[in-house]
Amino acid sequence: MRPIFRLLPALALLGACTETYTGTPTGEPATLTEVPDQVVQLAAPGQDLSALQIMPGDGCYWYRYVGPVETTYLPLRTIDGRPICTRA
């Protein structure tokens, strides 16, 4: 077997170990410490603004929802139901 063919599987495994984004050491987006005033004014009531994150996939704000069964992140929405994002 040629030496190059022995090297290919090792290179593939090494490439699988790289990350494209890490907001925190755990790989999750970082929780915002300060919420911009514009976001507070746009957000519909009933959403927890104390634990917001900007998701790297869509650039939108997501808030932590603590439900009876699980805790998850949901898109932060305006009164009209539109998502609040950092980019168009």
Image (tube, helix red, strand yellow):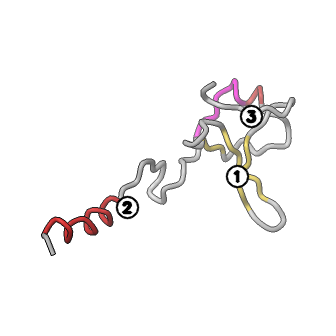
Classify residue 83 as left or right of residue 88: right
Return the disc, 3 or 2, that comes first in the chain's sequence.
Answer: 2
* Residue in the foreground of this view, choosing between 38 and 9: 9
Tell whether position 37 is magenta.
Answer: yes
Amino acid carrying label 1: it is: Tyr
Return the disc, 3 or 1, that comes first in the chain's sequence.
Answer: 1
Classify residue 55 as left or right of residue 14: right
Q: Which residues are magenta?
A: 33-39
Q: Which mark is residue 23?
A: none
Identify the image quadrant of the N terminus: bottom left
Tell whether position 1 is magenta.
Answer: no
Amino acid carrying label 2: it is: Ala
The percent coordinates of residue 23 (x first, y second) are 48, 48
Q: Residue at x 16, y 65 (%)?
A: 4
| Secondary structure type for disc 3 | loop
| Secondary structure type for disc 2 | loop
Return the disc, 2 or 1, that comes first in the chain's sequence.
Answer: 2
Mark 1 highlights which residue?
A: 73
The percent coordinates of residue 40 (x first, y second) are 73, 30
Q: Residues within 10 Å of mark 3 (few under 14, many from 20)?
A: some
Between the residue at mark 2 and the residue at mark 1, the CA separation in whole angstroms equals 27 Å
Mark 2 highlights which residue?
A: 16
